[in-house]
Image (spheres, grey):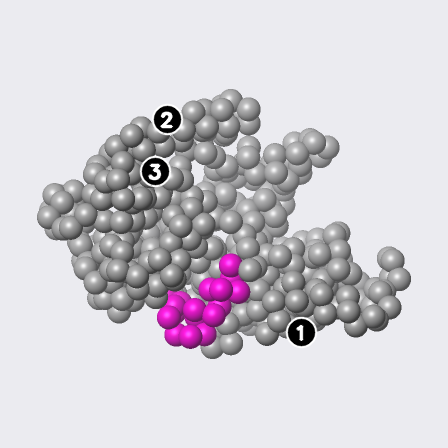
Amino acid sequence: MLSRAAAGGRALRTGGQPPLRGLRASPPARSAMPSWVIDRYGRNDVLRFTRDMVFPTIDFPNEVIIKVHAASLNPIDLSMRSGYGATALNMKRDPLKLKSADAEFPLTLGRDVSGVVMECGLSVSYFKPGDEVWAAIPPWKQGTLSEFVVASGNEVSFKPKCLSHTEAASLPYVGLTAWSAVNQVGGLNRSNCGGKRVLILGASGGVGTFAVQLVKAWGAHVTAVCSHDASTLMKKLGADDVIDYKSGNLEEQLKTLPLFDFILDNVGGSTEKWALDLLKKWSGATYVTLVTPFLINMDRLGVADGMLQTGVTVSSKTVKHLLKGVHYRWAFFVPSGPSLDEIAELVDSGKIQPVIDQVFPFSEVPKAFLKLEAGHARGKTVIDVISKK
């Protein structure tokens, strides 16, 4: 398979005539589609099914329209339903404040998609209509609990060949979040991870189950922290040690183990007060947390003051722990088609497998939200969008 750069280069070298500006061969225009939306923030009763959601359009030449075959839910969908992070997301959607205050509604939730490319922008050479793809759509864009969704070409990747759409839809958002934390922020990769001791707090959630498999595929020794009923799953995914956080004082249990080279914290809260003491000092050991006050600060203080407070917080913590001989980092979801390309290779080689708790038909999206809200899931909650049930 050609790389994205090679594909683009090949398109230039063929010498074919570019399409005339503004002209495109498109299927007959559609104006509406079925979708699950919210018109205000709140609890589950704000979810509304409509057949009249505005059909997505290609507004930039690097965009593609995807027919959604399957989507999945993540904790961010619960947070966005309730309005968490709305200040930051609205700033991203409309940085010049050109739209009305409620322009984000109706809002479609859902970040994961596995489906088929329906239409491509004029500069897209890496994909074509009919390609099976997967992606994680950034939270400032309209989501995937819909018949179609638009995405930037650099957010999209070819779906792993070995997975069905429902299986593939469970991975992009959690996979890219874990990839950001472990690889881009934590600096681990297939060439330097072998033999390192990795601790994953909150290992049985979506990000945790992916991270366990990822660092294990790269040769790390993995210690997973979860509840007892998830221990069998953790062993199946490759964890070397499994610690039940309910079976006693977690901090004391972990202190009996050799020190770690890397810690991924999916839990936050009080864990940050003691987890960094479990790292090897002055060895480049790193603690990465996915639980940060970034969006809360902006919701509470506004954009400018929230960003200032966030900067002060992360800077002071970084310096404080650096003086103690360890690295302290925050990580966030980062949309990336090229990273999904690498993840797809790991999936197709059998090193990473989807972990799915339950699949719901498109008609039962509210039930899927309730399932996710109840907690204690072992893997992802997936929506079969093309199901006729």
Inspect this view and state whether residue 73 appears.
Answer: no
Q: Is residue 11 magenta?
A: no
How many residues crowd mark 2 within 10 Å: few (<14), some (14–19), many (20+)? few
Q: Look at the picture and state if 161 lies above or below 88.
A: below
What kind of element bears circle 2? helix
> Which residue is at 21% across, 63% downward?
240
Residue 250, position in %: x, y? 16, 45
Q: Amino acid at mark 2?
A: Ser
The answer to whether marks 3 and 1 mark residues whose Cβ atoms lie closer than 8 Å is no
How many residues crowd mark 1 within 10 Å: few (<14), some (14–19), many (20+)? few
Q: What stretch of residues is rendered in magenta?
A: 339-355
Q: Say whether residue 375 is left or right of residue 184.
A: left
Query: Quarter of the image holding residue 336?
Result: bottom right
Q: Say whether residue 137 is left or right of residue 51.
A: left
Farthest residue, direction right: 20
Query: Quarter of the image holding residue 326?
Result: top left
Q: Amino acid at mark 3?
A: Tyr
Give the label on residue 316, or none.
Answer: 2
Tell us which disc is closer to us: 2 or 1.
2
Q: Earlier in the sequence, mark 3 or mark 1?
A: 1
> Which residue is at 30% across, 61% downward?
194
> Which residue is at 63% across, 45% downward?
106
Q: Look at the picture and state if 94 lies above or below 182.
A: above
Residue under numbered circle 1: 130
Residue 375, position in %: x, y? 33, 52
Farthest residue, direction bottom: 162
State the residue in front, 386 or 178: 178
The answer to whether marks 3 and 2 mark residues whose Cβ atoms lie closer than 8 Å is no
Inspect this view and state whether residue 285 appears.
Answer: yes
